[in-house]
Amino acid sequence: MPQLILAVLVALTLSACQGGATADPGAGPGTASATAGSGSEPGAGSDAEVTLPPTSGTFDYQLGTAYEPDGGLDVVVRDATAEPADGAYGVCYVNGFQTQPDQADLWLGDHEDLLLHDAAGELVVDPDWPDEYILDPSTEDGRDRILDLLGPVITRCADAGFSAVEIDNLDTWTRFTDADTGLIEKDAALALASAYIDLAHGVGLAIGQKNAAEATTDGHELGFDFAVTEECGAYAECGEYTDVYGQHVLQIEYTDNLPDGFDAVCADPDRAPLTILRDRDLVGPDDEAYAYEQC
């Protein structure tokens, strides 16, 4: 996963989260706007106006390496440490439910109690990403303190000119389900998600639900504006996203997990309008492992 720079977290202050940034008005074709504060509409709980991603054009997912392809892009996702792509609707990646690699010093000092522990008191790590600890959203105070650290990263996304943010690892409550080995309750995870939604909308950013197909209805009702899904084609769950978010879904498949091939993904009536195939490490075009296709 991409790395957030520790200096960004430490140098920025939570008060910056109250700044007013507006969404990119030139977001390309297929753009729709949602005004917050309209009850069941995306963005409830704020007076800021946000702009949803286009539903047509060219899309890329550039978390590993940021690059400018020939011909440009209409929608591009980049890490929070990167700058948004010129002329595109920019989505900023933030890991909102786990720590980023190389940030142990930030979390293991005064903030270790914000990390998930097992019944023996040992810290829990993601088995697929062993250099990432799991954030513990179980208490209101803990959620507030997590926002103290990660809120400025979201604000930085707005200040840098991104139009939206995607919050990764919402699905921790589906993966850490045992009190002995580390337990996250769904309600606690959704409460932290709701806080991220309010914060993002407060600085004029649309916010995307990342993965967690089992929580699309919950996520949309909380106020997520769109969805970003990895490998929904590989796992036959794209309809879980498009049935709830309609065309406002960004879909990424990976070359190392294509049971029926990319042509079958593109032929799926439930796939997102913007669906791409990428290499797992999301490298740049100069790397021999680079892969990119779009339906």
Image: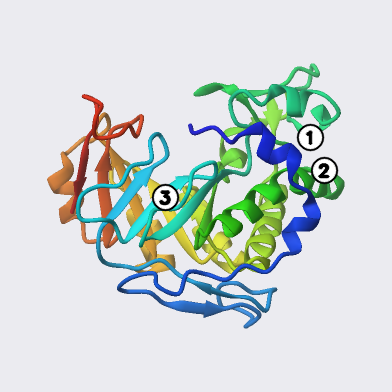
Q: What's the residue type where badge 2 is placed?
A: Gly
The one of 284 and 214 positioned closer to us in this rendering:
284
Q: Is residue 45 above or below residue 155?
A: below
Locate residue 17, reporting x and y percent: 73, 58
Residue located at (78% from left, 52% from top): 14
- Residue bearing the label numbered 1: 114
- Residue bearing the label numbered 3: 77
Label 2: how many residues lie within 10 Å, few (<14), some (14-19) or many (20+)? Answer: some
Q: Earlier in the sequence, mark 3 or mark 2?
A: 3
Q: What's the residue type where badge 3 is placed?
A: Val
Disc marking residue 142 = 2
Is there a contact, CB below 8 Å, between mark 2 and mark 1?
A: yes
Locate residue 25, reporting x and y percent: 45, 74
Locate residue 138, reporting x and y percent: 78, 43
- Any part of residue 137 in sight: no
Q: Residue furthest bottom?
A: 38
Q: Earlier in the sequence, mark 1 or mark 3?
A: 3
Locate residue 35, reporting x and y percent: 57, 80
> Which quadrant of the structure image shows residue 90?
bottom left
